[in-house]
Amino acid sequence: MTSYPAPAPSTESGAGYKLLALFLSLVVLIMGFFGLWLAISAQHASDDAHRAATRTGTPTTASAGGSMAGMDMSSTSAATGVATPSFAGAAPANADALAMAHAAYPAALPAAPAGPVANVHLGISHDVLQIAPGVKYETWTFNHSVPAPPVHVRVGQLVKVTLTNNSPMPHSVDFHAARIAPNVAFTDIAPGATKTFEFKANDPGVYMVHCGTAPVLAHIANGMYFAIVVEPAGLPKADKQYVLVSSEWYLNSDGLKTPASLDMVKAEQVNPDWVTWNGYAGQYKTHPLTADPGDTVRFWVVAAGPSLDTTFHVVGTLLNRAWINADMTDAPQHDIQTALVPAGGGGVFDVKIDQPGLYPFVSHQFASVALGQVGLLNVGDAKGTMSH
Ligand SMILES: [Cu+2]
C-alpha cells in the first residue's frame, strides 16, 4: 500500500477549519446549481419529446401555398429545433401502378454539340414534382426537372451559360467544372433577372452543377443540381452511356395528399426520407437501364448530396475501369468493387457484362438503398425483376 503523508495539522487550526468549511459550502452550492440545471434540461427535453410526439401523424403544414414555402418551413422548423417524424417509404396503395406509369428520368448521355461553343440555357422555377411513387415535393429546379437534364460538352469547348430566374426568390448557379471567379459568375440573380457568363471546359470529367445561394443546404436539398460531362478525346469506346445523379430528400410531410417541402432540421441532421438516382426513388427498378451482353456501359456519376456520399457498386460485376473522383487526366483504375463518389464530386465507371441478367446498381451504403437508391441494369433483355 502506498501511504501518503497525512495532511499536516494546522497549527492555526481555527483558520484551517474555517477555510475547509467555506470550501465545502461552495462545493454544495455548485452542486446545487448543477442539479437545478439538470432538472431544467430534462424538462426541456421532455417538452421537445412531447411536441415531437404530438406532431406525429399530423405533420405541420405551415407551408400551405406560396412558392417560398420550403424556405418558410425551414425557418419554422429550424427555430423549434425539432424535426418532423420520418416519412421514409411512405406510399399509397397503388404505388406499384404509379411507379410503372412514371416516366423515368432519361439517363442516357445526350450528344455533345458540334463546334467550338456549347450554349447552356438554364431557367429557374419552383415546381411540384414527384420524388417517389405518389410522393409530391415542392422542388426548386433548373429547367423544371430534378436533376436538370445533363449537359454534355467536349474538352476545349467554350461553355456559354445563360441563367434566367423565373422564380420568386434569388438563386444562382455554380459549375464545378469551371475555373472562374465565383464572386462574379456564381452570384445571386433576382427574380425576373437574367445573367450570362462563360468558361472554357478544360478539365475532363463529370461535375456537379448546383445553386449556390445561401443556405446552399436548402437550395440543393430542394433539387437545384445536375451533371455536366466534359468528355476528353480518346476515351475507350462505350456502347451505352448513362448519367446518374444521387441525392437525398428531407420531407416535412409524407407528400401523399399535399406536396411536402423541406424539413431543414432533418437536412441539418442528415436524416433523409428518400435517397434517389436521378431524383425519383427506385425508378430504374421498374424502368431498367439496358445493355447488350458484352457491351461496355459507361456510368457518369455525380453525388449531389446535399450531404450523403455515394459508394457506387454494381451487383454481379466489377468496375472494369474506374476514373476515381472523375479524374480523367490520369489513367483509370481497374477492377474495383466499390468506388466512393463524394458529395459534390463525380466518378466515371465502365462495366462490361457478358452474362445476361439483372444487375442492380446501388450506393453500397445500404441505408441509401433502403430509402430508394437502387436501379437495375438489364443486360440482354432478361425477364423478371430483382430486389436488393
Ligand atoms: Cu437556389
Image: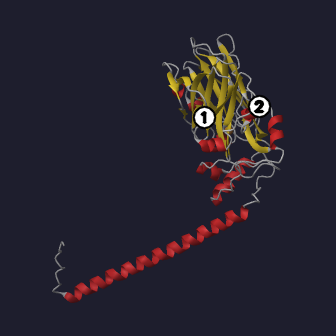
* Residue 149 x, y percent position in the rendering: 72, 27
| Earlier residue among tags 2 and 1 | 2
* Residue 232 x, y percent position in the rendering: 57, 15
What residue is at 18 percent from the left and 72 percent from the top? 2
* Residue 83 x, y percent position in the rendering: 65, 56
Q: Could you say which disc has been placed on residue 224 in the image?
A: none
- Which is closer to the viewer, label 2 or label 1? 2
SS at circle 2: loop
| Residue 180 falls left or right of residue 225 | left
As rendered, which of 223 and 366 lies closer to the eye?
Answer: 366
Question: Quick check: can you spot residue 121?
Answer: no
Q: CA distance from mark 2 to mark 1?
A: 19 Å
What amino acid does circle 2 point to? Ala
Question: Quick check: can you spot residue 126?
Answer: yes
Q: Which residue is mark 2?
A: 104
| Residue 27 falls left or right of residue 292 | left
Q: Residue furthest bottom?
A: 14
Q: Could you say which disc has been placed on residue 303 in the image?
A: 1
Residue 106 figure quarter = top right
**Placement of 255 over or under 362, stated as above or below:** below
SS at circle 1: strand
What residue is at 72 percent from the left and 48 percent from the top? 89
As rendered, which of 364 and 136 lies closer to the eye?
Answer: 364
Q: Quadrant of the C terminus?
A: top right
| Residue 219 falls left or right of residue 137 | left
* Residue 348 x, y percent position in the rendering: 58, 24
Q: How is the image coloured?
A: secondary structure
